[in-house]
Amino acid sequence: MLRLNNIEVIYSDVILVLKGVSLEVAEGKMVALLGANGTGKTSTLKAIFGVLHTEIGKVTDGSIEFYGQRIDR
């Protein structure tokens, strides 16, 4: 199970791109992220996969858990 709990993502220590994003994906299920350009879909996925650092970004609040283990640190 994947769980995002109220995450916040900031780029370059000043640009808030996500605030209060929460979602839960149960085992064996799929979720689609839909939205217009610039709404945070890619930033959400980068936070989950831990690659925000490639764009000087970081999760500054909330938590990301995969099967109960924190993966956002």
Image: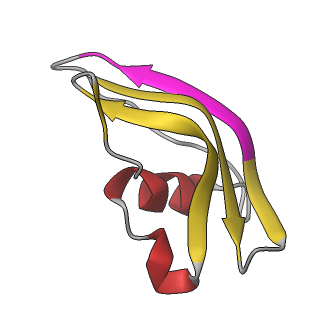
Tell me if 72 is positioned left or right of 13 in this view.
Answer: left
Seen at 73% across and 55% down, the residue is 39
Q: Nearer the viewer, residue 43 or 56?
A: 56
- Image x and y of residue 26, in percent: 28, 16
Which is more toward the observer, 34 or 68? 68
Q: Quadrant of residue 14?
A: bottom right
Q: Main secondary structure of the magenta part?
A: strand
> Residue 22 in magenta?
yes
Of 39 and 65, which appears nearest the observer?
65
Q: Is residue 73 above or below residue 65?
A: below
Quarter of image, res 6? top right
Residues in magenta, as a range:
19-26
Q: Is residue 69 magenta?
A: no
Quadrant (top left, top right, bottom left, bottom right) of the N terminus: top left
In the image, 22: left or right of 47?
Answer: right
User: What is the residue that sits farthest to the left in this orientation?
Assistant: 28
Percent of width and height locating residue 21:
65, 35
Q: Horizontal and vertical percent for residue 61? A: 65, 43
Total of numbered circles in the picture?
0
